[in-house]
Amino acid sequence: MISIAHRTVVASCVAGGLLVGGASALTLKPTGQGVAREFTITGDQFAFKPGRIEVQKDDLVKITFAAKDIAHSFTIDQYRIAKRAGPGQTVVFEFRADQVGTHRFYCNLTVDDRCKRMEGELVVH
């Protein structure tokens, strides 16, 4: 015969396992949708930092883009994104990464010829 104390311990372990399992389920991505990914990218001294970001297909990507020295833009043609930030300004935007591949992001401004060399990569797996 099983004692009441033993049943309580077993029930507590099972309930605890369900809670842990439930918490894990909340962190998994729902079917057909990715998870939220946040990145802070700076444009400074004619370079993006970081110069490469990686996400999974269907992730919701939130970018906080800051121009440190002069005005810069964050442009990704495949996603029709062109966001401009003035010197010392920040712009925040989101998009769904629904196109697998490596996508170039760049500065589309012509303030200085070195702007044309500002490039980075968004990799969508």
Image (cartoon, rainbow, N blue to C red):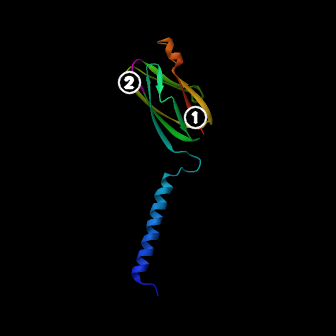
Q: Give the range drawn in magenta.
A: 66-70
Residue at left offset 47%, top offset 87%? 1
Circle 1/circle 2 CB separation < 8 Å? no
**Tally of numbered discs:** 2
Q: Is mark 2 on a helix, strand or loop?
A: loop
Residue 77 position within the rendered picture, expressed as x and y whole percent measured from the top left: 58, 25
As measured in the structure, the alpha-carbon distance from the residue carrying label 1 to the one carrying label 2 is 26 Å
Residue at left offset 59%, top offset 37%? 124
Within 10 angstroms of label 2, few (less than 14), some, or many (20 or more) residues?
some
Residue on which the image places disc 1: 123
Within 10 angstroms of label 1, few (less than 14), some, or many (20 or more) residues?
some
Residue on which the image places disc 2: 89
Q: What element carries label 1?
A: strand
Residue 31 position within the rendered picture, expressed as x and y whole percent measured from the top left: 58, 50
Dot 1 or dot 2: first in sequence order is 2
Q: What residue type is labelled 2?
A: Gln
- Quadrant position of the C terminus in the picture: top right
Residue 26 position within the rendered picture, expressed as x and y whole percent measured from the top left: 48, 54
Q: Which amino acid does label 1 sit on?
A: Val
